Amino acid sequence: MTLAAAAAPAFAAEAAAGPNTPAPPRDARPPAGDALTEAVVRQVDLATGMITLKHGALDNVGMPPMTMTFKAKDIAMAKRVRAGDSVRVRVENVDGVMTVVKLEK
């Protein structure tokens, strides 16, 4: 069998797809968008608006699972939770400060 004969089926498959058919994405996962991460509230400081969370991976900011203190988007958010609460959060880098921008109980 010649090289040309062996390669013919591959070229035929490409031709059948058509020149305007987009290639499938390399990473078929949907974008993270507003994905929420599971976390447990460890501490809330209402005076500073800070919430300490033991959280899963925060993929959108490249942070592995750990316990860390974050700024709450607003004081009302901090007032809704207590130490020990299981929550789902969205953390983003807001003007250089890691901030909880969405929180669900």
Image (tube, grey):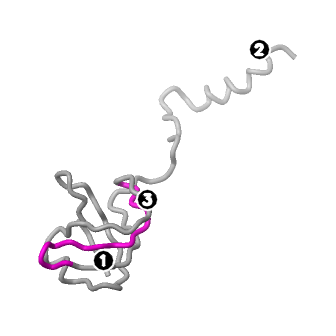
**Of the image marks 3 and 1, the number of the one nearer the N terminus:** 3
Q: Is residue 89 above or below residue 32?
A: below
Which structural element holds mark 1?
strand
Q: Name the kind of residue labelled 1 in the image.
A: Glu
Which residue is pictured at 17% across the width and 52% down the height? 95
Does residue 72 show up magenta in the picture?
no
Image quadrant holding the N terminus, namely top right
Alpha-carbon distance for marks 3 and 2?
Answer: 50 Å
Q: Residues within 10 Å of mark 1 (few under 14, many from 20)?
A: some
Which structural element holds mark 3?
loop
Residue 70, percent across and down?
A: 25, 66
Q: Quadrant of residue 8?
A: top right
Residue 43, percent across and down?
A: 28, 79
Q: Which residue is mark 1?
A: 104
Q: Quadrant of residue 39?
A: bottom left
Q: Which mark is residue 78?
A: none
Q: Name the kind of residue labelled 3 in the image.
A: Pro
Q: Which residue is mark 3?
A: 64
